[in-house]
Image (cartoon, rainbow, N blue to C red):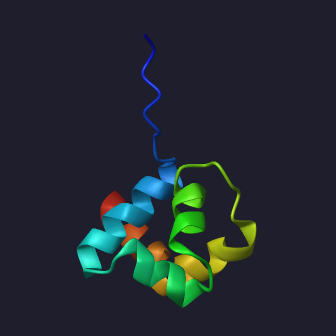
Amino acid sequence: MKSSKRKLTPFGVTVKKRLIDIGMTQAELAERVGTTRIYMNLILHGERSGEKYRDKIVKVLDISTFERKISA
């Protein structure tokens, strides 16, 4: 029997790590960018593109700074 466990996209992994780092929940992030917790989950798992929200997510979480810290 094949496992159907959902996996986060690379973007989803980055978002989750950043949420943990700053102590924010996925639901709080969803509210701040103007979507639902469920839709946010679909974006992070690659089941929806979330193009409309990606820039807002990156801005709210300051991901570009976070990414530089990871690669340094």
Measuring from the top left, give residue 57's x and y in whole percent.
55, 77
Q: Position of residue 9 (x, y in %)?
A: 52, 47
Q: Which residue of the protein is positioned furthest toward the bottom in this rendering? A: 32
| Residue at left offset 27%, top offset 80% | 22
Question: Horizontally, is 57 left or right of 18 in the view?
Answer: right
Specify the quadrant of the image occupied by residue 38. bottom right
Q: Give how far across and how far down residue 47 sits, in percent.
A: 64, 48
The answer to whether one can see residue 17 in this image is: yes
Horizontal arrangement in the rendering, residue 21 relative to residue 35 (left or right) = left
Q: Residue at x 71, y 57 (%)?
A: 49
Q: Is residue 65 above or below residue 47?
A: below
Point 61% across, 49% down: residue: 46
| 5 w.r.t. 54: above or below | above
Give left or right: position of 49 versus 4: right
Counting the numbered discs, the total is: 0
Quadrant (top left, top right, bottom left, bottom right) of the C terminus: bottom left
19 above or below 70?
below
Quadrant (top left/top right/bottom left/bottom right) for the N terminus: top left
Residue at position x 32%, y 80% in the image: 24
Looking at this view, name the residue that lies furthest to the top: 1
Q: In terms of depth relative to the viewer, which is nearer, 5 or 50? A: 5
The reply to whether residue 72 is visible in this rendering is no
Q: Position of residue 33 (x, y in %)?
A: 58, 85
Residue closer to the observer: 46 or 17: 46
